[in-house]
Image (cartoon, rainbow, N blue to C red):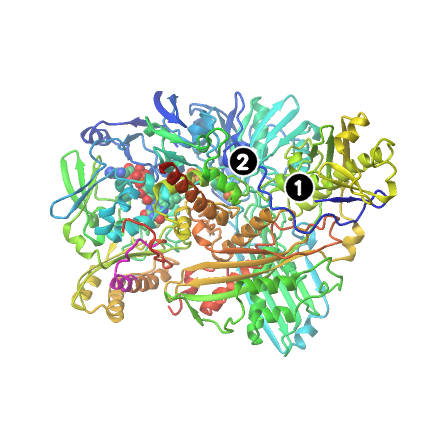
Amino acid sequence: MNRFEYVRPASVQEAVTAASQPGSVYLAAGTNLLDLMKLGAARPERVIDITRLPGLGEIDWRPDGSVRIGAMVRNSDLAYDERFARTFPVVAEALLSGASAQLRNAATVGGNLMQQTRCAYFQDVASACNRRAPGSGCDAREGENRLHAVLGWSESCIATHPSDFCVPLVALDAVTEVAGPNGMRDVAIDALHALPGETPERETALQPGELITALKLPSDAAAFADHARYLKVRERTSFAFAVVSAAAALRIDGGKIQSARLALGGVAAKPWRARDAEAVLENAPPTQEAFAKAAELALSEARPSGKNAFKIELARRLIVRALSLSTEGTPEAMPALPASPFATVPSANHAR
Amino acid sequence: MPVEIFPSSPEHRRHGSNAGQPLTRRDGLLKVTGKATYAADNHREGMLYAVAAVSSIARGRVKSLDVQAAKSHPGVVEVITPANRPPLAHNPNQKMPPFGFRIEVLQDDTVRYANQPIAMVVAETLEAATEGAALLNPQYETDTARTRRENGERFKPEAVGVGGPSRVAHGDIEAGFASAARVTEAEFVTPAQYHNAMEPHAVVAEWDGDRLTLDMPNQALVLSCAGYATYFGIPPENVLIRSPFIGGGFGSKAILNGPQILAILAARMLKRPVKLALPRAQMYGPVGHRGATWQKLRVGTDAGGRLTALHHHTLSATSSFDDFLEPAANASLPLYASPAILAEHEGLRLDTGTPGPMRAPGEASGSAALEVAIDEAAEACGMDPLEFRLANYAETEPGTGRPFSSKALRECYAEGAKRFGWSGRPLAARQMRDENGCLVGWGMGTAVFHCPHFPAEARATLRADGTGLLETAGVDMGQGAWTALAQIGAEALGLDPEMVELRSGVSSLPDGGIAGGSGHTASAGLALHNAGRNAIDQLVDLATADPESPLFGAGNVGVVARAGRLHRRDDEGRSESYSDILARARRTELVGDAKAAREPAAAEAHAMFSHGAVFAEVKVDPDLGQVRATRLVGAFAAGRIINPRLVRSQYYGGMIWGASFALLEEAVTDHRTGRIMNSDLAEYHVPVNADLPSLDAILIPEDDPYVNPLGVKGVGEIGITGTVGAIANAVWHATGVRARRFPIRIEDLLSDW
Amino acid sequence: MSFSISLTINGEKRAIALDDPRVTLLDLLRERLHLTGAKKGCDRGQCGACTVLVDGRRINSCLTLAASLDGADITTVEGLANGDDLHPVQAAFIAHDGLQCGYCTPGQIMSAVGLIAEGHAGDDPERVRELMSGNICRCGAYKGITEAVLDAQKTLKDGKRRDAA
Ligand SMILES: Cc1cc2nc3c(=O)[nH]c(=O)nc-3n(C[C@H](O)[C@H](O)[C@H](O)COP(=O)(O)OP(=O)(O)OC[C@H]3O[C@@H](n4cnc5c(N)ncnc54)[C@H](O)[C@@H]3O)c2cc1C
Ligand code: SF4
Ligand code: FES
Ligand code: FES
């Protein structure tokens, strides 16, 4: 790790000012940033510690039923918040399927949204990587890319975004609140993460110095609480990143899907909202045929970026399964193995 | 537990009952309070930190290093490169018998595998040393990496494993196949796997003149002293290794390696103590691994499902400059009664670090393939896999006809099957589902592991206060030597375990041999046993010759040592305490020394193996291909069990390794560069707690009068054998898909795409 | 750059001068304060061997910058026992043989203490397994670990009930 200047600003304004200088980076819990710094994949000159900034640690419910979650709220605190888990069970399940209990205790909302790809070549400074070192090439393109992207990738970069949390968030139209040198603005999760195109180094829509201060979930997202599941295929039962994951949320009434939300994780450089699939589900009965059609549509643009064609078929099946499980209804209690195909749901205590 | 003493014929008697006591670990208290000191926990006044820089190419040479950049980083004290490396007294390109490998200690600028040390940075702090190593910015002259089967160089090995035969033929193999009603053929690939003990290799090295003190995890204390002495040109007695606790070894901490030697050299060069702890990523290269294999099996069966021929061919990967080969085919030798068996190996030279022994070397990979092939043969014969294995049960060692020193495998099959609920298993695949619609499969495998015995020495002292002291340079890497060796020694001394002190884990003690091959409890244990008996013999001599002792003249009738007293065998009421005997003889202590080795005649005359049967249940998501090993039951017969609690833990650990082999572990190499791209613990998957919801280990009683006078076989490695096959066979039973490569991956089980 | 932070470690308040901002909590404990109970298995949040409690919550000390913890309350495995009285989790690990080599053990134990305090597992072994999955044990002591966690949790609960009565 390179030596750096450690800065602990007292206010959001101070933080933004400090971070606007080139070479600066925000430090939240550090579970992603410190890792990358140890690897040498991040070598910041100035580390701006935002963990003590005032006003970023609350979960505020608005009268209209929407919620504003401070960027410093820890992943586990959010997932186990009773009202949050009841209102947005699919988000809680995704959170609890990510990383480990220790990491979730530390990891912040902002850090989770802003975490960088787990592409091995990105993490390895001896490899060519356009995302880390623009113009150097992409060693993953012809390399060990079994788990890389099948949607939205470019010749410049085939990385995926690793967050579980972001997948239901994009499905539910969550929005980030951002403070920057020019004031505050909102950035939808769908617009936060960028597809690589020719500029994979531009990972997010944030400008230098911009700080996520909060995450907001709109009130209508709560309407899906009864039919919402997150499902994550992994190579071990727990403590593994998604091979592919899916968040499905339905509003079902009178035997028909009134509205549907669907997003995939582990398939692209951003959490992947499947709007076409949502559209065919609307007003359809919740049947396997409808789900299969949605799955086809969701993956219609998919193509392997390497040894990962299986992920396309896997994603299709996962969509069908996630939609089926959502139709059955959100479980009363958080499954013992959140988001696992082997989830069993005994009645042990849980927020839900 | 009473010990019988027969002054006239002390040798080759079985002592005590077969079932030992399930004592909790004697080192448990230190371990749960954080007071157990592992190598990297040591700190010395004035200590420096060493961090190795490693190569990011697999073959070529280092053209340049930016030593200046590293040196000017605040805190960096020295950068050691081939240009300034002080000389060593041994040529590292030469092997050092018996287990010394060729290693890389900056002897030149060549690179022969990725992650090879190419420099060592020493600094005042760990942070500075780490950054110093990152600043070296190596430039290379790169040659094409040869890390694939297709571009490696094939060769005929002279030996495999540790001196094992490269080719063994029993009977006429082609005649066996010619007479077969069916021949089942199957090929398997097993990947490179890395030991990944939770404790990375570490050393704190301190020189005092030409005396060297090393705190390091070490599975072969006394042998390693000789090794370091040779490298540093000092007498072996000048080297002291302290290794009271090892955070897992699995074979990787028995062999000298480059980084540790360089750290010791740095300490000598800079005249200050040096600490080195390998970063996890550097555990993928210079400290050994399980080499990849490509295996081919042919199984001939007659109309009744009896084997007519068994052919096991293995291509084993090794490095370009040394030759440890995974002896996988030899796993087919001891298990099934086939009139003809051919086990043969080829070698493949790759630009990797040299493989080495890793928990059940050969047996693990070989058993994985064999047990699947046997299952396929059973299927071809329309037989239940257990019925098939019983039909081919080897009553004597296949090929040689030697009797087994003991073999309670039949009981393992029966008890394991009963506990698991094997009967009623549908023969065909894809027949069972759980309440959630998951595919369920049941599979089994036979476990087997040989019983090596290493020469060892020990000392046992009876003290005036009636307590005992046991001393041997034994090694606890989790198997429980601190407890089991104390139990064995205490029993020999006729003392309760609480009454004995065990000194171990330091090289200056009597040579406890190697902790490897699952042979340490038997080897060091026998030495302690003999030492204890030697001390008791002396005590008996004192007592029986003393007219004032109630035991006077007991001589030939014999005396029993129990709970700190000697009793007359013919009249147990006549007894005397150890301390009284010693006090009257004005002795402050009695010291028994012993050496122990296996009786060569018994070894020649018998085939010696531990056996077991593993039954596995897996669940597989029918659409998504994700697998979970939901239930494992293993029944093992391994001679006398000293401590059932510890032994069960060894079996669980072995079975978890089996699950890991079957479903998780694989080093993923980018063959363009020859580098491992998942050299960590996030992407190189080993099991987590949630992977193994149900484990059961059954201890099958077994008396073995030949294996050694203790009747103890090994338990540390056998659990992994059998389990890999059991899980793979269960996956087949669930899905209908036969494992052809390990680990079994999600994409292997996604049908029809 | 040199600066000073204040930490309460195992109940003892300490002022710590840091000459280097890079120091992680794990390296601070191990290399500078010589509290070596917490272990380094990966240094990347991937194994759990370095688990300690920060303000009562279990976290990976290897991925935490010491400087950012100024004012925090740290509990390591060394601070768990009350003199010679083992914490129920420690005692249960011995009783259930939830350890072999012992290297992952301090992390497992601190993680278990955190898990019990969090209170999300109930008495469901499957939840315990899931919530202990951030602690890798290469020796494979998982069965004993799960049993120990459930057992210790019960002991602690019964103790509380007794105290209340
Ligand atoms: C072993 C391991 C396993 C993991 N497994 C999973 C998994 O299965 N699923 C999953 O989803 N995640 C997983 N993670 C990732 C984990 O979720 C992230 O590391 C964590 O969420 C990051 O949060 P943090 O607070 O530690 O962020 P930090 O590491 O502090 O920051 C991460 C990045 O975000 C930036 N940042 C932080 N906060 C803000 C803000 N408010 N505004 C702007 N930028 C900000 C930082 O500058 C930095 O670039 C895993 C991590 C590890 C180490
Ligand atoms: S896929 Fe993207 S992140 Fe990975 S090496 Fe290529 S450019 Fe870098
Ligand atoms: S050392 Fe911190 S998680 Fe492994
Ligand atoms: S006891 Fe050895 S790693 Fe857990």
Spatial separation of the CA atoms under disc 2 and disc 1: 17 Å
Q: Which residue is mark 1?
A: B487
Magenta range: A322-335
Residue A214 shown left or right of residue A310 in the figure: left
Which amino acid type corresponds to the residue marked 2 in the rendered image?
Leu
At 14% across and 50% down in the image, what residue appears?
A: A219
Tag 2 secondary structure: helix
User: Relative to C3, is C79 above or below?
Assistant: below
In the rendered image, which quarter contains the C terminus of chain B? bottom left
Residue B26 shown left or right of residue A103 in the figure: right
Asked if residue B453 can be seen in this view, the reply is yes
Tag 1 secondary structure: helix
The image's mark for residue B29 is 2
- Which chain letter goes with mark 2? B
Which amino acid type corresponds to the residue marked 1 in the rendered image?
Gln
- Which chain letter goes with mark 1? B
User: Relative to B72, is A302 above or below?
Assistant: below
